[in-house]
Structure formats: structure tokens, C-alpha cells
Amino acid sequence: MRSYGDLFRTPEFTPLFLSSAALTAAQTTGGLALATLVYRATDSPLLSAVSMFGPSLAQVLGATLLLSGADRLPPRRALTAISLAFAAGTAVLAVPGLPMWSVFLVILTQGLVASLGGGVRWGLLNQILTKDGYLLGRSVFTMLSGLMQITGYGLGGALLACLSPHTTLLLSAALYLVSAAATRWGLTRRAPRAEGRPSIRTTWRTNATLWRSRPRRLTYLGLWFPNGLIVGCESLYVPYTPASAGTLFACAALGMLLGDLAVGRFLPPTLRPRLITPLLVLLAAPYAAFALHPPLWLAAVLVTTASTGFGASLLQQERLMRLTPETLSGHALGLHSAGMLTLQGASATLAGTLAQLTSPPTAMTALSASSLTVTLLLAHANRPPRSTRHATLHPVTPAPSPRPEHPTG
């Protein structure tokens, strides 16, 4: 599978793609409307931020309770039900006068549902595509996510300028229904990838199995921490430059798109494993320059350059799939997604706290240094033992096999 055309000629790829596009647009539009609604009701920046990051932070709970269903539920039925659940929850949030405790209860429930959705969706993608096509296909979905986030936030801002947050939430619920329709009538019926019934005990046991392998454990840490810390930097765009934060967000999305395009389309397979660490370094290093308070044009260049490093995530996911049995692929990818979003939410909270105590540029620099430190530590941990490297550099010529004393034939 060598081109994007090959992807869209693959059966079921297009409906899964369209379903994801509608889902991402609904999440961003609804998230902006909900944050606006909560802020107007409480005048609290903290509660407004939690209303947006709450579903991400709740995914850590979902990862410990629900992920066994990622491989043990029929994919089409599960994805359709998840979109319908989000539509229903968003419609409830649109009810005027809803008590604030009810709002956050719905947000928690949506976070739990979302933790299962990532595993089902990416496990199905791994089934739809050939082994050599997963990285290219995942890069398309990552680029789609960036573009739809820009579109969703732009659409949400325009709608909020003309309509109330309650009406905008209802329109977001309608987008979730579009996503549900795309999965229900666009995907074929498939059996679960693994046998057995989903349960909390099975989730814990599978999490332990995935975590027990040292290569998989290091891959997960590499997927979660360097990425999450840099998202913390991105969460400070607004306090760094309130009037031009949208420019930096757009540049970040552009850089991510370019990085995913280069990694997914042009990077030869033999070069991919060696570029994970350089890309993660590229992801973090430019943010260290924010300590010098760069002007907007330079900040935009730094953000665009740094965000190309997000392409490392595609290479790490490819490594994770090589290390994981197919019957656990959905659970493994769901654990990656839940952990990544949890770390992103936690890093945004950490970034805001540091910026409150110091300044946004100082907090960005600190998070950049932390991300670089984690990357270098993981690179060292992933190095093969010295004896293995020595054997690779200086292979030992095996002794000739002894001749049989009584040759036959």
C-alpha cells in the first residue's frame, strides 16, 4: 500500500474516515460551546478548562475498567453505540438550567466512553489495512484530526457568535449522529477480534500483560510523556499572546500535518526506527527558545517546526503493533490513546500552574526541558545491551559443524 489513493480504494476505509471526521468536528465544536457555557455560568476559568479537558482526564479511569471491550465487542456495533452515546450526552448538556454537578457527571461518562472508542476504532483500522498500510492510514487520520480541529473550533466560534451555546451543543449532537450513521451503514459486520466477554478483571489482566513486556512498556512511555509535555506548551498559547493565539494553533496544526505527511508517505521503512528519537527531540527543542520571548513571526516558525516532530507518534504506534498480538491490537491502541490523552490533560494543568507561578515563556521552557530529558532517558533505555552491540559490530564466525562419522546416502 503505497499511496493515499490505495487507502481510499480499500473497502471500509472511507466510511471509517468520514465517521472520524464527523466525530472530531462534533467534539471540538461541542467542547468550545460547553467551555463557553460553563464560564458564563460560573465565571471560573478553572471549571471552564476542566469542562474541556475533563473527558481526556477521565480516560485513565476508562483504561482501567473498559478497555477489554476494545477487542471483545463487534466493531461496527460498538462504534455506532459510542457515537449515539455522545449524541445523547451532548443533547443533555444542551438542556437549559442543568445543574453544574450534572454537567460534570455527563463529562465523566463521555470520557469513559471515549476511552473504549479509541481502542475499537484503531483496532478496526489495523484489521482493514494490510500490515504495511497501517502507518500510512494512521497518518491520514492524524492529519484529519488536525484539520477537523481547526475546522471545528472555527465553526464553533462562528456559531457562538450567532447562536447560543445551547443551540451549538445541539448542532454538535447532530454531528455525532452523522458519525453514527457512517459507521452503521458504511462498515460491514465483523466478529470481535478476541473471544470472551469484556470485564474489569479482563481489562486489568490485559493491561498487565501489555505492560509486562519491557519493549512495549518503553514504547508506551515514549508515546505518552514527550508528546503530553509539549501539548502542555501548546495550552499556553493564549496567555503567551492573547491576540494571536489562533495563529500559533494554526501553525501547530500545519506542522503536525507536514510531519505526518512526511513520515507516512515518504519515509522508507528501513529509516523509520532510527528517526523516532530525532523527531521527539525536534518536537521539544524549539520551545526552549520561548525563554527569549520571540516575536510572533519567530514563534510561529518555532511552533511549526516543533510540531513536525509529532510524526514520531506514528512510528511508535507502528513499533507497538509489531510488539503486540493481533487479538490484543485494539486494547493496546486504546491504552495508548487513553494514556496519551490523560497525560495531555495533566500536562495542560501542570503548564497552567507553572505559568501562574512564573510566566508562560518560563513554563514552556521548563516543559520543553522535561520532554527532552524523558526522550533522552528513553533512548538510552531502548539501546541494546553492550554485549549485543559488540556481537553485532564484531560477529563471531561459527565453528564448522563436525562431519558425521557415518554419512548416509
Image: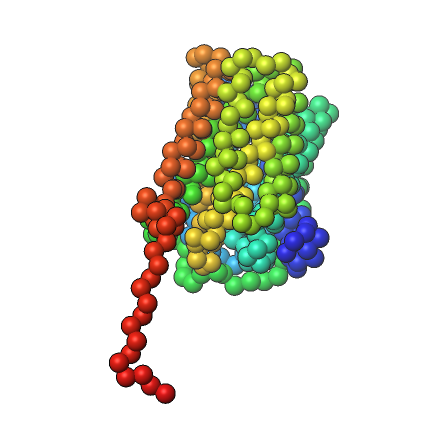
**Residue 294 occupies quadrant:** top right
Relative vertical location of residue 211 with respect to residue 368 in this rendering, above or below: below
Q: How many marks?
A: 0
Relative vertical location of residue 59 with respect to residue 130 in this rendering, above or below: above
Indicate the position of residue 259 as horizontal and vertical percent values: 61, 37
Q: Nearer the viewer, residue 68 or 30?
A: 68
Q: Nearer the viewer, residue 232 or 201?
A: 232
Position of residue 145 in the picture relative to residue 349 (left or right): right
Please identify the residue farthest to the bottom as the structure is shown.
409
Position of residue 230 in the picture relative to residue 197 (left or right): right
Please identify the residue farthest to the right as the structure is shown.
162
**Residue at screen point 63% across, 22% down:** 300
Indicate the position of residue 205 as horizontal and vertical percent values: 34, 52
Relative vertical location of residue 92 with respect to residue 324 in this rendering, above or below: above
**Residue 328 occupies quadrant:** bottom left
Q: Quadrant of the C terminus?
A: bottom left
Q: Nearer the viewer, residue 196 or 222?
A: 222
Residue 303 visible to an observer of this rendering: yes
Indicate the position of residue 227 as horizontal and vertical percent values: 49, 33
Residue 76 visible to an observer of this rendering: no
Position of residue 94 in the picture relative to residue 402 (left or right): right
